[in-house]
Image: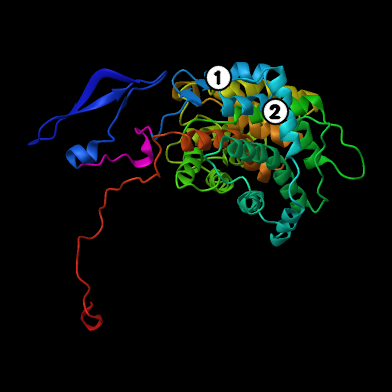
């Protein structure tokens, strides 16, 4: 990990100090500055941590310039094509893909934990019916720690695994219940005869009146969305989970913190924002007008679902979702739907217009996943919940990696204080 080269920091008037350089499997080398304060008495300033590696990790790697995303070394394209979401969740936790017997055992373990405590169901009644489902999720997921506290020794691998099973298994149930509570329909209990994703769709869209039959094309589409969103390196919500967990907080509280962070429109709310944008444009005839506005630097309008902060070329997940999107629209006969025709026209322009090509503003995964979820029948307010369901696999894997790292310490970012200098409190009658 540490190579023979060193970085030398020279501050005017002081002796130079060497710092080791750490070499990764992929990506940028890192200057190890952990001893900076002790050796020189300085902090570094890096707002947003854009040039700071906050941890060592073996889970996910992104190369934004190449448009590459790897889970445990496997390209996302291969995983989405050859594995289902639970196989990917197993991979994120254990470091290797399951063999047939391990896959069967893992799926059985997840099915064992899909139900939630009956007392937890009453917790929903404390929310207004029109509460945003992400607000409900933050509360309910956090409350899990009040029900499942018998396996709270997180130095014990079996306790950590049990928490992983519970979170992966119960998130679909919790999310579906949030949806049903909002719509006023009765909660649907899990079915052990269905796959993970088909069971989620059953709990979302089924009713006691008839047996729900999941459409295989739609199940595959949603399962692909889960896989593509399962982890994404040290983003804001993942870093929130790690920082929360660094204090020794239980994993349910940490995941609730991650959900709260994901709720932000700059993070997990992008696909919801994309659908709102399409509704604002309204019709294919107005695409040209909005494209012109998007190119105008003085106009506040922005095309949502185009470009990505990390990927400087095409988002690799978007390539996969584009095919899934076309399959779903074809399966449901929605090719001529007003909203989806509008989305297809925006996509065509973005892939052909020199302005978008030059700035590399290609449709990203949020653009396509929002369209797919809308077509399946998932309301826009639930989009970020779907994101959270998928990302929980990565969050818990990241949490476990952190607390089992012998070098881990409670997170304590430093600051560059620019407030008032030390001063004394004046008597009340002397204050201006």
Query: Is residue 282 visible from the viewing direction of this image?
Result: no
Q: Is mark 2 on a helix, strand or loop?
A: helix
Q: Cα distance, mark 1 to mark 2?
A: 45 Å
Q: Which residue is drawn at 87% across and 32% down?
A: 213
Query: Measured from the top left, where is residue 238 in percent x and y?
Result: 50, 38
Q: Which residue is drawn at 34% across and 41% down?
A: 47
Tell me, yes or no, whether the two marked residues, 1 and 2, touch with CB atoms within 8 Å.
Answer: no
Query: Measured from the top left, where is residue 26 in percent x and y?
Result: 42, 18
Q: Is residue 416 shown left or right of residue 334?
A: left
**Magenta segment includes 45:** yes
Task: Please tell me whether residue 199 is drawn above or below residue 65 in the rendered image.
Answer: below
How many residues crowd mark 2 within 10 Å: few (<14), some (14–19), many (20+)?
Answer: some
User: In terms of sequence position, does the residue under pointer 1 or pointer 2 come before the other?
Assistant: 2
Give the residues drawn in magenta, as a range.
42-53
Query: Is residue 299 visible from the viewing direction of this image?
Result: yes
For the stretch drawn in magenta, what is the main secondary structure? loop
Q: Which residue lies furthest to the left in this view?
A: 13
Quarter of the view holding residue 359: top left
Q: In which quarter of the image is the N terminus?
A: top left
Q: Is residue 256 shown left or right of residue 332?
A: left
Quarter of the view holding residue 229: top right
Q: Which residue lies furthest to the right in this view?
A: 209
To which residue does mark 2 refer? 106
Q: Is mark 1 on a helix, strand or loop?
A: helix
Q: Residue at x 74, y 58 (%)?
A: 122
To which residue does mark 1 refer? 352
Of residues 100 and 68, the one drawn nearer to the viewer in this rendering? 100
């Amino acid at each position: 990990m540490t190579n023979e080269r060193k970085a030398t920091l020279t501050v005017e008037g002081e002796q130079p100090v060497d710092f080791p350089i750490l070499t990764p499997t992929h990506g940028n080398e890192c200057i190890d500055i952990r001893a900076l304060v002790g050796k020189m008495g300085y902090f570094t300033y890096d707002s947003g941590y854009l040039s700071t590696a906050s941890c060592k990790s073996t889970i996910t790697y992104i190369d934004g310039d190449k448009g590459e995303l790897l889970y445990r070394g496997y390209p996302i394209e291969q995983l989405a094509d050859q594995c289902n979401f639970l196989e990917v969740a197993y991979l994120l936790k254990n470091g290797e893909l399951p063999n047939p017997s391990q896959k069967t055992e893992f799926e059985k373990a997840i099915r064992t934990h899909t139900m939630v405590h009956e007392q937890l169901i009453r917790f929903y009644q404390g929310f207004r019916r029109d509460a945003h489902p992400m607000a409900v999720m933050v509360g309910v997921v956090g409350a899990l720690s009040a029900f499942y506290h018998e396996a709270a020794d997180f130095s014990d691998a079996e306790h950590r695994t049990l928490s992983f099973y519970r979170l992966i298994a119960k998130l679909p149930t919790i999310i579906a219940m949030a949806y049903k509570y909002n719509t006023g329909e009765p909660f649907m209990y899990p079915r052990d005869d269905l796959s993970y994703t088909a069971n989620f769709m059953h709990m979302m869209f089924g009713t006691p009146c008839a047996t729900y039959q999941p459409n295989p094309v739609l199940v595959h589409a949603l399962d692909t969305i889960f896989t593509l969103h399962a982890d994404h390196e040290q983003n804001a919500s993942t870093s929130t989970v790690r920082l929360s967990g660094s204090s020794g907080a239980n994993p349910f509280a940490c995941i609730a913190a991650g959900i709260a962070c994901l709720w932000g429109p700059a993070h997990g709310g992008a696909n919801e924002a994309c659908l709102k944008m399409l509704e604002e444009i309204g019709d294919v005839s107005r695409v040209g007008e909005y494209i012109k506005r998007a190119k105008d630097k003085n106009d506040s309008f922005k095309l949502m679902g185009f470009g990505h902060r990390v990927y400087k070329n095409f988002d690799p997940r978007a390539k996969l979702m584009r095919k899934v999107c076309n399959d779903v629209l074809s399966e449901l006969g929605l090719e001529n739907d007003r909203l989806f025709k509008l989305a297809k026209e925006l996509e065509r322009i973005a892939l052909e217009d020199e302005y978008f090509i030059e700035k590399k503003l290609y449709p990203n995964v949020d653009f396509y996943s929002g369209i797919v979820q809308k077509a399946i029948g998932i309301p826009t307010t639930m989009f970020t919940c779907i994101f959270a369901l998928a990302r929980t696999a990565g969050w818990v894997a990241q949490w476990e990696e952190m607390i089992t790292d012998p070098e881990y310490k409670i997170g304590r970012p430093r600051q560059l204080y620019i407030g008032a200098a030390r001063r004394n409190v004046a008597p009340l009658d002397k204050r201006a």
